[in-house]
Image (tube, helix red, strand yellow):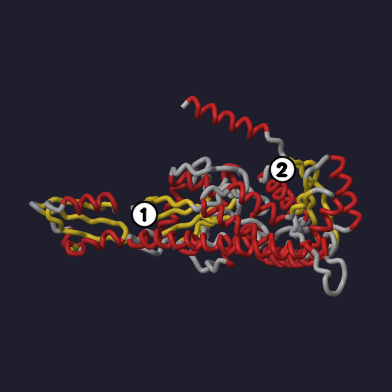
Amino acid sequence: MLVEAQQASLLESSRVSTPKERAVLVAVEFTANRKKLTATVLQARKAAAVTAASEEQVDLAPAESPDLDFDASLEEFQELARSAGAEIAATLIQRRPRPDAATLVGQGKLDEIAGVVASTSADLVLFDHDLTPSQLRNLEAKLDVRVIDRTQLILDIFARHARTREGQLQVELAQLEYQLPRLAGRGKAMSQLGGGIGTRGPGETQLETDRRKINLRINHVKQQLESVRRIRRQQRQRREAVPVPVVALVGYTNAGKSTLFNALTKAGVLESSRMFATLDPKLKQLQLPSRRKILLSDTVGFIRNLPHTLVTSFRATLEEVERAELLLHVRDASSHMLDEQKAQVERVLGELNVTGKPVVEVMNKIDLLPEAERPALEGSGRVAVSGLAGLGLDKLLEAIDAALVADPVVQTSYRLPQSEGAILAALEAGAILLDKKFNGNLVYVTARGPASLLNRYRRFQISEREAAIP
């Protein structure tokens, strides 16, 4: 034990002493798109304000500046960089009507970025935007440091947090599919010397070799993932033999899903303020107030502009969302981008074709809000909770009970011989006994619980009138 403790201490010290990479962050906002969006938003807000004014006298104040959304997006990008282990050396903002085809940001801003990189001794530059292969090459040639776009940054965070073999395979598949189109042109730039026969140099041959290797690896990883899916299907079939509905937690990254999952199930899974701390699905059985049992699933969080390759690669993980009877959409009630985050989550759910499922909105982190603001968060299909402080959990369980259609709660009366003690014990464990009377060698019981349990003992079922006779 002492040796293990010393090894753990050495490992921790080495982790602490590892220097972080210094990164220059570049956030780009395209004002042409923003103007279109702003006009639409202003029109909608004006219409809403006019409607409200017709119902009651209100002041038609001017709409808020859209810069609030950009600032919140910038804060989210900075948190992504920290989650990847970067030390932020500087943050630069570029506003332009439309992207530059060669460098995304234009020559003037590129010179400024190069100067900041040199003055801060940065190791890499992170762009809060996806870059084309040609833009990536041009930027790296000019800046002489590694350039990483938003998708690659998210993939790196996923790679850091993948723990299970399945998670690692899914991250690798997404990374390979991201790298494949970005090989195009590199060999050509290195070796195509001119037109005509005999001009194909070793660089282009190397490009084709790299493509073939990546395609072979992609096929191999897909085969391994299919094996994982096969095992998962077998496990699911065994679960479905005993009808236990699945309830899946979904939501924006860092909305507090894992904290809420632990608060409900006492599972002890990793809780972290870092983005994408949960990659591998967690399943835990939970008993509702009606004594029905469910499987609660904790899933990977979504984010603005989530790369499509990730949605595709993590489809095996997100199968729990597709199979779920009920979705709990966990939202960060303290976030400045509450509505935007909801729209992004619903967009990903649309890609998974699960928009028709019943949803309970869980307004989490109410402990960060004043008490006077909390009641306004609750309403039809919405429950206000705090997974960290344990607030509102009983209401949430009741809401899950009410929203579940599968295995409905029923009330049944029985007349049991006292020799059937095993049945009585099963009813006491899996249902709520509303009434229990003894009459000679018989026990009259009225129970309320899941139909899957109560229907097992139909042969002892009687009418409520008969149950009241003793």
Residue beneath the point at 60% across and 56% down: 172
Q: Position of residue 5 (x, y in %)?
A: 51, 28
Dot 2 falls on a residue whose secondary structure is strand
**In terms of depth relative to the viewer, which is nearer, 411 or 293?**
293
Above or below, comparing residue 191 to residue 71 in the picture: below
Residue, disc 1 = 293
Q: Position of residue 352 (x, y in %)?
A: 55, 66
**In terms of depth relative to the viewer, which is nearer, 53 or 179?**
179
Q: Which mark is residue 463?
A: none
Task: Indicate the amino acid at tag 1.
Answer: Lys
Q: Position of residue 269 (x, y in %)?
A: 49, 44
Q: Quadrant of residue 37?
A: bottom right
Earlier in the chain: of badge 2 and badge 1, it is: 2
In screen coordinates, is 405 left or right of 255? left
Above or below, comparing residue 88 to residue 74 in the picture: above
In the rendered image, the residue lying farthest to the top is 2
Q: Which mark is residue 86?
A: 2
Q: Position of residue 407 (x, y in %)?
A: 35, 62
Structural distance between the alpha carbons of marks 2 and 1: 43 Å
Task: Indicate the amino acid at tag 2.
Answer: Ala
Q: Quadrant of residue 53?
A: bottom right
- Mark 2 or mark 1, whichever is nearer to me: 2
* Circle 1 Cα neighbour tier, 10 Å, few/some/many (<14 / 14–19 / ≥20): some
Residue beneath the point at 78% across and 67% down: 36
Would residue 32 be seen by someone viewing this image from the given angle? yes
In screen coordinates, is 68 left or right of 399? right
Q: Quadrant of the C terminus?
A: bottom left
**In terms of depth relative to the viewer, which is nearer, 392 or 176?**
176
Above or below, comparing residue 12 to residue 230 in the picture: above
